[in-house]
């Protein structure tokens, strides 16, 4: 039987033992989620974020913080300081998701919380889906109609790939897609 998390902070528990595994977080911002994730994840975490301003077409907006970020370099420094506690198990990739996918091989878990428009969400999903290990999970945040195009894009991806979809039960749900079908 597979454990399915009710809250995104429990997503690392999708794996019984994550000691030798690799996770990737797309859209790290100030590492608020990354620091929570690492409390239960025992493997490596690759944090991917260009930490740059995308302009008015892609505002760097975080619904859970209710604020717009104005200084991405400062966000990067905050993230580095927060993640110092996990030194040796974390890596920073200050680049796009697609660029990082060239460097990061065979992740076991990918958590997408980058740009929320259809094209970027789909690009991230397709890019990392083919990189996942056979028992890997593709996950992400903000599965809600009022947060960008995440919900529509995830549903489109699930239909295209005939995969399973699971959700956390939070106000801003996370979505979870296993690379291989699971039995509940």
Image (cartoon, grey):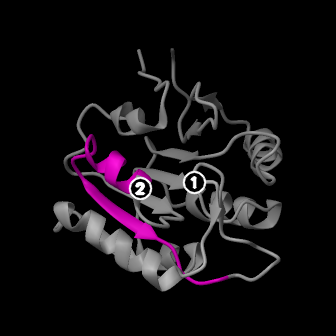
Res. 32 mark: 2
In the rendered image, residue 38 lying in the magenta stretch gets the answer yes
Looking at the rendered structure, the secondary structure element under dot 1 is loop
Using the image, determine if residue 54 lies above or below residue 18.
Answer: below
Residue 30 shows in the view: yes
104 or 36, which is in the foreground?
A: 36
Locate residue 82: give its quadrant. bottom left
Picture coordinates of residue 92, whole percent (x, y): 36, 75
Q: Are marks 2 and 1 in contact (CB under 8 Å)?
A: yes
Q: Which residues are magenta?
A: 33-53
Asked if residue 157 lies left or right of residue 136, the reply is right
Locate residue 173: give its quadrant. top right
Looking at the rendered structure, the secondary structure element under dot 2 is helix
Between circles 2 and 1, the one closer to the viewer is 1
Who's the residue at 57% across and 56% down the image? 112
In the rendered image, residue 48 lying in the magenta stretch gets the answer yes
183 or 167, which is in the foreground?
A: 167
Query: Rounded to the nearest whole Å, what is the CA distance between mark 2 and mark 1?
Result: 10 Å
Q: Residues within 10 Å of mark 1 (few under 14, many from 20)?
A: few
Who's the residue at 51% across and 18% down the image? 183
Asked if residue 166 lies left or right of residue 162, the reply is left
80 or 128, which is in the foreground?
A: 80
Using the image, determine if residue 98 lies above or below residue 130.
Answer: below
Picture coordinates of residue 72, whole percent (x, y): 53, 80
Q: Which residue is mark 1?
A: 65
Dividing the image into 4 quarters, which one contains the N terminus?
Answer: top left
Picture coordinates of residue 43, whole percent (x, y): 24, 52
Residue 107 shows in the view: no
Picture coordinates of residue 11, whole percent (x, y): 42, 37
Earlier along the polypeptide chain: callout 2 or callout 1?
Answer: 2
């Amino acid at each position: 039987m597979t454990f399915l998390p009710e809250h995104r902070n429990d997503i690392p528990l999708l794996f019984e033992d994550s000691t030798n595994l690799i996770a990737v977080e797309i859209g790290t911002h100030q590492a608020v989620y990354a620091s929570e994730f690492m409390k239960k994840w025992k493997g490596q975490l690759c944090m991917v974020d260009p930490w740059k301003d995308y302009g008015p077409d892609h505002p760097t907006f975080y619904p859970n913080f209710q604020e717009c970020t104005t200084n991405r370099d400062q966000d990067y420094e905050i993230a580095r300081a927060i993640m110092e506690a996990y030194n040796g198990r974390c890596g920073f990739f200050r680049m796009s998701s697609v660029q990082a996918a060239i460097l990061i091989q065979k992740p076991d878990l990918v958590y997408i919380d980058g740009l929320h428009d259809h094209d970027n969400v789909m690009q991230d999903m397709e890019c990392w889906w083919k990189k996942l290990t056979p028992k890997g999970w593709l996950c992400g945040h903000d599965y809600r109609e009022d947060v960008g195009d995440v919900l529509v894009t995830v549903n489109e991806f699930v239909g295209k790939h005939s995969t399973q979809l699971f959700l956390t039960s939070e106000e801003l749900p996370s979505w979870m897609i296993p690379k291989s079908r699971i039995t509940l």
